[in-house]
Image (cartoon, rainbow, N blue to C red):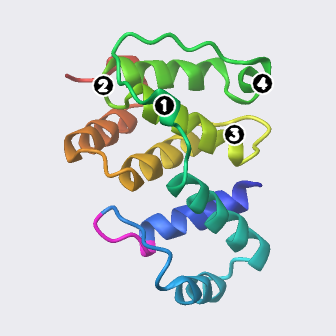
Amino acid sequence: MSENVLDVLIYLVENVMLDGQLSLSPEMSEIKSQLENAGFSSPDITKALQWVDDLKNNNFHYLSKETSSTFRIFSPDEQKKLTPAIRFTLHCLERDEVITPISREIIIDRLLALDFDEVHSDQLKWVLFFVLCFRGEHPVRIQRMENTLLLDNPSSTVH
């Protein structure tokens, strides 16, 4: 996948999501048509909708227990794609309780599924927003995320 798929996802967030929810099942052909009319290619649309479907059907049941004291070790492949700055941002977001350990894992999974050579902060911000909204996170978490991401330095988060 590529930046074009992320562009489709951003378009979905900005134009199709209602109240933080994205319902793809009933109006799938309508959504595809809207995306094609917006100028996106059919392969990018298909990949983006598959990305959303995979998000909806994520299988993170093994992370059923939320805990505030987790330690994440990144694999070599994850380290290549998720720069130290991205990993630090994820750490700060979790430390500041903007995301949970489960949300962190889903965010990492969805970032890696986009198959970027290297993830940049803008890409992280959009995936983070998309995952939190789609998972129906509490509005306070979403507000914290928006406040945190408006700042360029996640370690300076206002509490």
User: Pointer 2: what residue?
Assistant: 97
- Quadrant where the C terminus is found in the figure: top left
Q: Which element is circle 1 on?
A: helix
- Marks 1/3 in contact by CB < 8 Å: the verdict is no
Residues in magenta, as a range: 15-19
User: Pointer 3: what residue?
Assistant: 112
Q: Which element is circle 2 on?
A: loop
- Marks 2/1 in contact by CB < 8 Å: the verdict is no
| Residue 14 left/right relative to 127 | left
Q: Amino acid at mark 2?
A: Glu
Q: Earlier in the sequence, mark 4 or mark 1?
A: 4
How far, Cα to Cα, is label 4 from label 1?
A: 17 Å
Dominant secondary structure of the magenta stretch? loop
Q: Earlier in the sequence, mark 2 or mark 1?
A: 2
Seen in the picture, residue 77 relative to 69 is either above or below; the reply is: below
Q: Earlier in the sequence, mark 1 or mark 3?
A: 1
Give the image location of residue 55, x and y in percent.
54, 53
Q: Earlier in the sequence, mark 3 or mark 2?
A: 2
User: Pointer 4: what residue?
Assistant: 80
